[in-house]
Image (cartoon, rainbow, N blue to C red):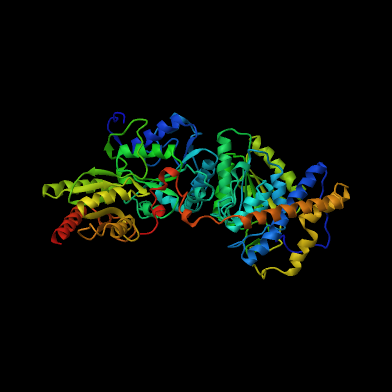
Amino acid sequence: MSEPTARTTLSRAYRDGLAEEMARDPDIVVLGTDLFERGGHWAQVTGLGSQFGPDRVRNTPISESALVAAGVGAALAGLRPVVDLNFLDFAFGAMDEIVNQAAKIRYWWSRPVPLVVRGSTGFSGGGAQHSNAIEAWFCHVPGLVVVMPSTPADAKGLIKTALRGEDSVIFCMHKMLTGARGTAGGPDDLVPFGRAVIRRPGQQVTVVTYGVMTGRSLAAAERLAADGIEAEVIDLRTLAPLDLSLIEESVRRTRVLVVAAEDYRPVGLGSEIAATAAETLADVLGAPVLRLGAPFAPVPHSPTLLGALSPSSEDVEHAARRAVKLATAR
Amino acid sequence: MRPHTLPGPDADPGIGLDGVAPERAVGWLRQMLLIREFETVAGPLTTSGAIPGGMHPSVGQEGVAVGVVSALVSGDVVAASHRSHHVALAMGMSPRAMMAELYGKATGCAGGRGGHMHLADFAAGFYGSNGIVGAGAGIALGAAFAQSYRHEPHCSVGFFGDGGANTGRVWEFANLAASWRLPLIMVCENNGYAVETRVDLATAGESIAARARSFGLAATQVDGQDVAAVATVSAQAADRARSGGGPSFIEALTYRFGGHDIGDRGRYRTEEEVAWWQRYRDPISRLCTELRQRGWLGEQRHDELADEAAALVRDAVDFAESSPFPDPATVARGVLSPALEDRSPTARGSA
């Protein structure tokens, strides 16, 4: 590991990681709307237009299907395209290209499709069609890697791994973390896929989380610690493939599991992790696995309604307390 | 638009071969005979169940694939549709690898994981057939983008049908290719029917080529049953693409002699119509007639080519039948890159 750089933001760290890889590899091209001058809608490629020119940072028509299709074909031809959808919600216009093309080609023909589809995602203002939490959709597709960093260092390290790897990657960046601050690594600090990280060690309850819920879970852990409850917070970072080994290792120590995800509970990441725990950790679990997730409703506009959607730090805290209490009572 | 499938006057105006070298024209025939033989043999094998699933036969459309591919060189790329055996064979794909894939055998081009809609041979520049209507043209679009980005003197061809011409994605592809002047050739095999729906009943506007023209592509309609005419417009399109002139669109008016798939009962068209096309617009008979009239093809040579095709397909069937099925234990292998494979929950299997 080289020395971490000065404090930066998640969005800027992503951009720096992309820029370093583009400087290293001329086969990397970025396709998307409003990238060249504007730098994208989330400042994710600010300045890359002037740095790399319009051939490599390409403004495109609003044609998601054509963008991802072009990305798949170009990846097959040896390029490393980054298709930037700005909003991950717009992936719905390219779902066939992602699910039926990019994800399946390796399985058929052992041919890598080194494609990155990046989008900002997660509950925030902007209404129901621009703020979906759809990361779990992609996790249900064999052949895709799905990542969602919660820190600048992971945003930078994960995009680097994507651009040096051989998989099709759905790169989710939570909108509410666009300006999240922290340090980032150097040019060769990669964050491997499929490896979660313990953000805070603890012995009494494991909180598995990712994305925007990571900070909320860490804040909850602070308050829990004040009451003598030591929570271990695991940030998944990669949502597919899941790092089930680290979760298992942690729960074997704590015997208590809470999954704190922002997305909907039905058929979500929480369901998957809880079900896996029920299958493989029944012998050690001291309490039922508790899942946090959003009420099952589209993303509303009004701030009061929106505030009711995403699980809060207090929700994590309460769930952890309840789970620990249930375990103690047994 | 007007349907092109209704029977016309009972006469074949014939095809021309002016400017075509005899051996080149005979080479086209050789490829077309191989395609027809492959389909003619594979069809009943599908009906009998030896080939699992189904297949979309390309009989009648051989001239389009052979004519288009005749304009290509090594380094060019082709991606195709769900009906693509003719394209795959024209690209020089191994009949063994194809037939074994149809059979679902480990020796197939996708190891039995794909089936007849997922044939590919990247070494030959064949970036795959595609089960999703219109999607192959998008793969070709991306390959054309890569060629353009790298300033390669090559082009990419995307095949789709009249059905694909009614998907939104195809026109996203056309617009992007024209906007960026990509070396893409979009080939619409208009065989008159999107499965069972006649093209004129579901397609507005003057023609599919006219739609493409409005997007700024150099667009033309061609008689898809005339391999030489297809070759001519394809060569023009390839020259345009390679010289930086941008994308082209070829609407090849063609006809499938068989059903949409094996088992299609054909209730959406008359027997007279099919018979008319077989009698007056068979691309192979038309080429043979012209070759004979020019004295470029004797009976003996024709029979040699037919025997060669039969032998190749027989060998492909023997190969497929004697090949092993893939090991069921490998069902979840190769989903992600090797570095991640063991981390995939599917690789772990059920509890």
**Residue at left offset 69%, top offset 53%:** B315
Dividing the picture into quadrants, the one containing residue B100 is bottom right
Q: Is residue A106 visible?
A: yes
Q: Residue A210: x and y, percent?
A: 30, 48
- How many numbered markers are drawn? 0
State the quadrant of the C terminus of chain B: bottom left
Dividing the picture into quadrants, the one containing residue A193 is top left
Furthest residue in direction left, as rendered: A227
Dividing the picture into quadrants, the one containing residue A280 is bottom left
The answer to whether A280 is drawn above or below residue A235 in the figure is below
State the quadrant of the N terminus of chain B: bottom right
Q: Nearer the viewer, residue A163 or A30?
A: A163
Q: Residue B328: x and y, percent?
A: 49, 57
| Residue A322 appears left or right of A47 | left
**Residue at left offset 71%, top offset 41%:** B236
Q: Is residue A303 visible?
A: no
Q: Nearer the viewer, residue A283 or A109?
A: A283
| Residue B75 appears left or right of A264 | right
Q: Residue B162: x and y, percent?
A: 64, 57
Q: Residue A296: x and y, percent?
A: 31, 61
